[in-house]
Image (cartoon, grey):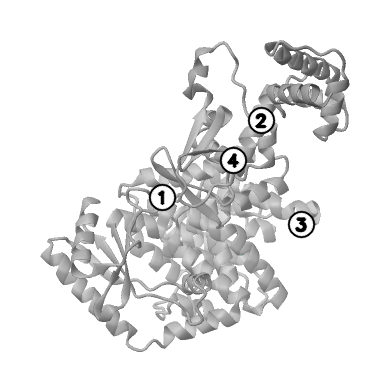
Amino acid sequence: MSQVDVNAGHGGALGGALPTQPGELPLTRRLRSLLTWPTTETEPVGQLVRTHRTIHAGADPAVLRRAYTIADNMHRGQFRKSGEPFITHPLAVAQICAELGMDTTTLVAALLHDTVEDTRYTLQALAEDFDHEVAHLVDGVTKFDKAFYGQAAEAETIRKMIIAAGKDVRVLIIKLADRLHNMRTLGVRSAASRERIARKTQEVLVPLCDRLGIQTLKRELDDVVLLHLEPDEHARIARHVHDRPGWDGYLAEVVAQARVALRRSRVDAEVKPRPRHLYSIWKDTVAGGHTAPFDLPRITIVVDGPATDCYAALGAVHGLWRPVPGRFKDFIASPKNNLYRSLHTSVCGPKNRTVEVLIRTTEMHRAAEFGVVADFRFPRSGGATARAGQLDWLRRVLDWEQDAADPAQFLQSLRCDLSEAQIQVVAEGRQIELPAGATPVDLAYELGTDRGDRCLAARVNGRLVPLSSELEEGDVVEIFTETDGESSLDAEVAPRGPRREWLGFVKSPHAQMQINRWFAEHSEPGISISDKVRLGRATIGLALRQYNRGLASDLPLLRLSEELGYPDLETLLVAVFDRVIEPDAVVCQLIDLVDNRQ
Ligand code: MN
């Protein structure tokens, strides 16, 4: 791309010619984020181009320089709270994307991600200077104006971002990189705003990152959130990790012994120490009620072969060191919700110390580290099915997004869906993750919309339970639906559908939305309250006739409605019509009332 094209396209955004330079100092990423704008580096995109081309050798650096020059000109005169020129921020965001292995288009959008929000540059100019793809990515991360939208701005912005990510997931990658850099540089902000931003990151963006399977980014976000929310704890864990006598030597010994054992078993594999990140140590320390930071030596074994080699490696490890009972988990046979796959075991290692071992194939390792990003980083490798699954989640979120009444409700549902408190239950032979407090109805909808709509009863660990009962970790659940039993004989009968009272106890936004949708589709708009009252009364009359009974007066019904806590008889009859209460249940209580208390 020539300089002439550049100047023609962006409508005067370019200032002077690009400075060139012979060489740059090799600064590490971390140093770069700590240092002020490096004066030694005369081509600011040099580092970015180099990082990008180590992963994508054929990438064209010209478009990156062009994007940088426009961003630099647009942000000229703007400064960050730290006093640095603003352009350092988009450059750092692009650098994070480059290190993840994202494509050139993403880096271009990252360089320009704040121009539309904070400068006079428009989306239209962006689309003309680059293309609609870049414009879409930048638009996806552009916030709604607080001055215009007020309180709703934040929720609106997240909703917009999720919708944009549904079309192109790179929107979310840029947003996550943007937040990571902002979090790294929060130090200059007030304590209150540091905490506020860190909490929001922890609530929505970190779990989003987890759902997309980008562990490499999540680790850093986790740690920087801990730094801002619990600075003393962060310092304590960091100190502990820093001075652990003999730790490195011990791990080297474990790795060496494991390598020998694998070679003997003819398993080709790479063995490495796998340090936990600070947040994960802190979480286990708190969860286990330990006073000293709790961390076990951990290694990964990445086998160079099919999944069956993982089990061969497991055999070699268990032959070398005695496994700790109850610690083996097979996430290959039952992947986690975010499709994480690996074997986990703990063994009694050298000197009788417990060692954690993770075993996976190269493909699983890439997916575990990079998630949806793996498609961009390793464009020619397989495994697209796993990523398609990760995007399924996003699609489902978009599905109930359409049903959400407003952005605040959507954000609330998103938070619930992303909440870390999850339980795993077993149903239809697979492990299914549900929000803590979920009921059999939540599970039924997780198994499929139709299963939910036709859900009749549930058996948990072999016993029938009410549909409203809370499931617990490890429960084995069977869901019975209308079509499971003999009721399928009367195919003429319309499916009875979900109950309104389910809305009172379901936990997952997915189930909630599906139930609401059913009622929206099945409500008859022409029907009036008085019709409902009439039909409700007729329903009870029909049910009574099955017991060869009839109603002489309204009096028993009136008394029953009082006893059941309804404000009046009409409300009870409407409830019967709406199937909030079963006609059979009303009739049984009615007969009981008449026979035993009159
Ligand atoms: Mn930004």
Category of crowding for the residue at label 2, using alpha-carbon neighbours closer than 10 angstroms: few (below 14), some (14–19), many (at least 20): some
Front disc: 1 or 2: 2
Q: In this view, does 389 lie above or below 153?
A: above
Q: Which amino acid does label 2 sit on?
A: Arg
Category of crowding for the residue at label 1, using alpha-carbon neighbours closer than 10 angstroms: few (below 14), some (14–19), many (at least 20): many
Which disc number belongs to residue 510? Answer: 4
Name the residue carrying label 3. Answer: 146
Which disc number belongs to residue 339? Answer: 1
> Is ligand 1 closer than 8 angstroms to the Cβ of mark 1?
no
Q: Distance between the residues labelled 2 and 3?
A: 40 Å
Q: Is residue 394 above or below residue 234?
A: above
- Mark 2 lies on a secondary structure that is loop
Q: Which amino acid does label 1 sit on?
A: Leu
Category of crowding for the residue at label 4, using alpha-carbon neighbours closer than 10 angstroms: few (below 14), some (14–19), many (at least 20): many
Which disc number belongs to residue 499? Answer: 2
Is residue 88 something that shows in the picture? Answer: no
Q: How far apart are marks 2 and 4 (CA)?
A: 16 Å
Category of crowding for the residue at label 3, using alpha-carbon neighbours closer than 10 angstroms: few (below 14), some (14–19), many (at least 20): few
Front disc: 3 or 4: 4
Earlier sequence position, callout 1 versus callout 3? 3
Q: How far apart are marks 4 and 1 (CA)?
A: 19 Å
Q: Residue at horizontal 66%, vertical 42%?
A: 505
